[in-house]
Amino acid sequence: MTSSLIIISGADRAGKSTLAKQLSQATGGTIYHFGPPDRTQKGIFEQYKHSLPSHGTTIWDRSYVCGFILERFRENNHAHIGELLELEIWLKSQVDSVLHVGVVRKWHEVADLHLEEIEGLMGAGDADWYRVNLLLARCNEHRFYYQELFEFYDHLTLFPSLINPTVDHIVSQLPTPPYHYEI
C-alpha cells in the first residue's frame, strides 16, 4: 500500500484543524497537530520525522511550513531554509506522495475570532489601546504569513500545493483513491 502525507498550512484561525478533521474522515488518515518546535531537539524540524505514514494517509496540521514562517516573523530568525529543504528531500525518500494544502482566509474573515480570543486575554485593568495593539500585531502576522506561504509554495517546496481546495479535490490528488465518505 502506498503512503500519502497531506501538509495543511495557514495563518491562525484559518480553519486548518477543521479541514484536517474532514480529511481524516474522508481518508481514514491520522492527524498530527504540531505546536512550536521543541527547543531541546537536535534540529528545528526533528519532531516531524517521527510522525510519518508507513501506509495510508497521514495529515499534518500546522507543521514545518507554519513553524518556518512563524519563526521568521516572531523570532526574526531566517536561518532554517537549509534545514527545511533537507527535511523535504528526506520526505521524498520516505513517503510515496506529499501534498501541501494552504488554507487561506482574508483578514476580515478571521478578525472576529482573533478579537474574541484577545478579549479573553485582556485583564481587568488593560486599556483599550492594548487590545488594539494586540489586534494590529495579529493582523501584521496574518499578512506576513500569507506572503511567506505563497513564496514557499511558488519558489521553495519540492511538492505540489493546492490553495483552498475542497476535500473532494484533495482526495482526488492522492495516489490511492477512491475513498468513500460522508461529511
Image: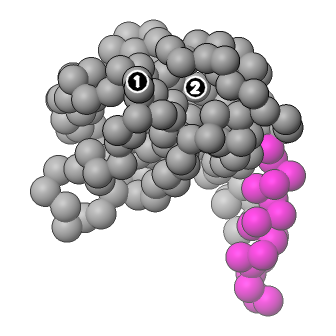
User: How dense is the environment of label 2, judged by Cα within 10 Å: few (below 14), some, or many (20 and up)?
Assistant: many
Q: Secondary structure at mark 2?
A: strand
The residue to which callout 2 is attached is 101
Please, what is the three-letter code of the amino acid marked with disc 2?
Val
Q: Give residue 64's quadrant in the image.
A: top left
Does the magenta segment cover residue 40? no
> Which secondary structure lies at badge 1?
loop
Report the amino acid beneath label 1: Thr
Q: CA distance from mark 1 to mark 2?
A: 19 Å
- Residue depicted at 29% across the width and 51% down the height: 50
Of badges 1 and 2, nearer the viewer stands 1
Decide if residue 126 is on the left or right side of residue 44. right
Q: Residue furthest front?
A: 1
Quadrant of the rendered structure where residue 134 is?
bottom right
Q: Residue at x 25, y 29 (%)?
A: 94
Taking depth in this image into account, of 126 and 93 the one nearest to the observer is 93
Residue labelled with disc 1: 2
Q: Splitting the image into 4 quarters, where does residue 4 fall?
A: top left
Q: In the image, what residue occupies the spot 71% across and 76% down?
A: 121
In the rendered image, residue 165, in percent from the top left (x then y), is placed at 71, 19
Q: Which residues are magenta?
A: 110-128
Question: Does residue 19 appear anywhere in the picture?
Answer: no
Residue, x 48% and y 34% (percent of image)?
56
